[in-house]
Image (cartoon, grey):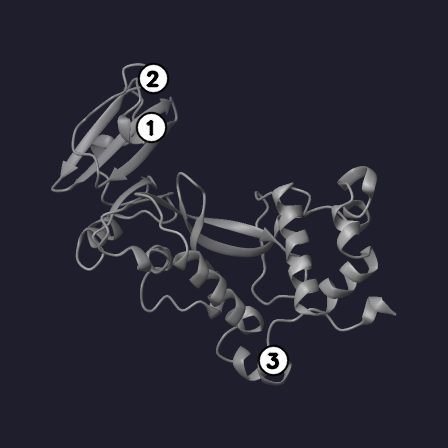
Amino acid sequence: MHTVSPIDLVELKALLGLLLISAATKSNHLPTRLLFDTRRSGTVFKACMTAERFNFIIKCLRFDEKQTREARKLTDNFAPIRELWDKLISNFQKWYTPGSYIIVDEQLVGFRGRCPFSMYIPNEPDKYGIKLVMAADVNSKYVINAIPYLRKGTDPQGQPLATFFVEKNTSTLYGSNRNITIDNWFTSVSLAEELLKLPYNLTLVGTLRSNKREIPEQLKNSKTRRIGTTMFCFDDKMTLVSFKPKSNKDVFLLSTVHDQPIINETTGKPEIIHF
């Protein structure tokens, strides 16, 4: 009957340790029977608990008060795990000082359970899951902040959604003069301008979608433009670069770090792309 007995702190730590090991060894997608197969995963899992006990705890474990959950879900779809999540993010920020370069990007965490804000993204490896928008240290890959995308439950506070995620994820870095690197879903001229101001004091480098109205027509693709050519546009503290890698494609990047038209002599690409 040990399979259905109450859990204590020691066993909870053992469970979390096993989950961390499975993630570190990229085995977290495997079924339990393979995790506890000594020929496949060694004896670490079996030394901590049985496979039946592991499955039972995973199935039954909750991180909030069931009696008050429904009331809290009226204002927060993330209520069943909000308290634990906030403590986890707080510890990320308390015990780690990030370097000068931060990346903000999204990740789909695979999950096929019942969830009102789960998503289907066909070009992602897991396809079904919960989307997180995260800020991480470029060098160590250490996560310093993460915000779940809750669909209609996400309140962007009157801002464009992409701007909200960047500013919210970097809120603990304001005034530090760090650089934020982002992709074209987040990047906009208005965001770059805003981050340079107080209280943000952050620089930005990001790819820019070709349909942005701020891009001059002269920088866009044309049949007469040679492959491998680069064009620059400078406006106060912002630099816009247009690079043509293929006959039918232009790549646009916006930077508030670079202020010179530097091109790598080896690759022929602008320095902003290498950055």
Residue 7: mark = none
Q: Toward which corner of the image does residue 259 lie, by quadrant?
A: top left
Looking at the rendered structure, which numbered label has been put on residue 274?
Answer: 1
Determine whether 118 is above or below 204 in the image: below
Q: CA distance from mark 1 to mark 3?
A: 49 Å
Image quarter (top left, top right, bottom left or bottom right) of the C terminus: top left
Looking at the image, tell me whether mark 1 or mark 3 is earlier in sequence order. 3
Find out whether the residues at labels 1 and 3 contact each other: C-beta distance under 8 Å: no
Q: Is residue 172 visible?
A: yes
Please rate how many residues cluster around mark 1, counting C-alpha atoms within 10 Å: few if below 14, some from 14 to 19, many from 20.
Answer: few
Point out the frontmost of discs 2 and 3: 3
Gap between marks 2 and 3 measured at Cα: 58 Å
Q: Amino acid at mark 2?
A: Thr
Q: Where in the figure is residue 174, as x and y percent of width and height?
A: 26, 57
Q: Earlier in the sequence, mark 2 or mark 3?
A: 3
Q: Amino acid at mark 1?
A: His
Q: Compute the Cα span from label 2 to label 1.
A: 10 Å
Q: Is residue 15 above or below residue 228?
A: below
Which of these two is toward me, 51 or 196? Answer: 51
Q: Residues within 10 Å of mark 3 (few under 14, many from 20)?
A: few
| Residue at the top extreme, as displayed | 266
Q: Can you say which quadrant of the picture contains the N terminus?
A: bottom right
Expressed as whole percent of the image width and height from the top left, the position of residue 200 reads 23, 56
Find residue 186 and report its horizontal and vertical position in percent.
Answer: 36, 49
Say which residue label 2 marks.
267
Whether residue 150 is visible here, answered yes or no, is: no
Q: Residue visible at 21% across and 24% down?
A: 262
Which disc is residue 65 wearing?
3
